[in-house]
Structure formats: C-alpha cells, structure tokens
Amino acid sequence: MKITTIGIDLAKEVFQIHGVDMHGKAVCASNCVEARLRGSLLTSNPA
C-alpha cells in the first residue's frame, strides 16, 4: 500500500510519525528523535 497522508505528533524530544493509505488504514507508525526526523521522512514511500 502507498502512503497518501503522513501525520506527525510534534513533541519536545520524540516525534510520533504515522502514515495512512487512501482508505484511511494505518500503513506505518514509528517514532524518532528530532535529528532522525528528516531521514525518516526521506525514506518513506511517496504516493
């Protein structure tokens, strides 16, 4: 499934990231620190 929407819960130290497909079904979920946020988004599969 392709990720169509990415949600990011911004916090002070750890960010929660989740991706959903076009049907609203969760495809992936992860957490990362600020330094890894850009890398996590760049490696996700764009729609």
Image: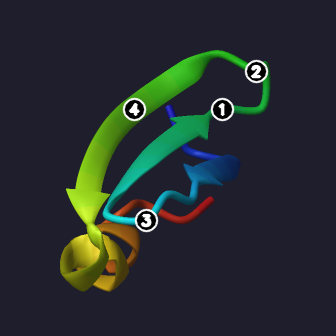
Name the residue that disc number 2 marks: 24
Labelled pair 4, 1 in contact (Cβ < 8 Å): no
Name the residue that disc number 3 marks: 12
Q: What residue type is labelled 2?
A: Gly
Of mark 3 and mark 4, the one earlier in the sequence is 3
Query: Quick one: label 1, few (<14), some, or many (20+) residues within 10 Å?
Result: some
Q: Distance between the residues labelled 3 and 4?
A: 22 Å
Residue at x-position 30% and y-position 76%? 34
- Which quarter of the figure has residue 43? bottom left
Local secondary structure at mark 2 = loop
Of mark 1 and mark 3, the one earlier in the sequence is 3
Indicate which label's residue lies in the foreground, 3 or 4: 3
Q: How far apart are marks 2 and 4 (CA)?
A: 12 Å
Q: In this view, does 12 lie to the left or right of 25?
A: left
- Which quarter of the figure has residue 19? top right
Front position in the image: 7 or 26: 7
Local secondary structure at mark 4 = strand
Q: What residue type is labelled 4?
A: Cys
Of mark 4 and mark 1, the one earlier in the sequence is 1
Q: Residue 34 carries which label?
A: none
Residue 38 in the image: above or below residue 32? below
Labelled pair 2, 4 in contact (Cβ < 8 Å): no
Labelled pair 2, 3 in contact (Cβ < 8 Å): no
Q: Distance between the residues labelled 2 and 1?
A: 5 Å
Name the residue that disc number 4 marks: 28
Name the residue that disc number 1 marks: 21
Residue at x-position 66% and y-position 32%? 21
Residue at x-position 24% and y-position 57%? 32
Position in image of residue 20 (x %, y %) = 62, 33
Q: How many labels does the image show?
A: 4
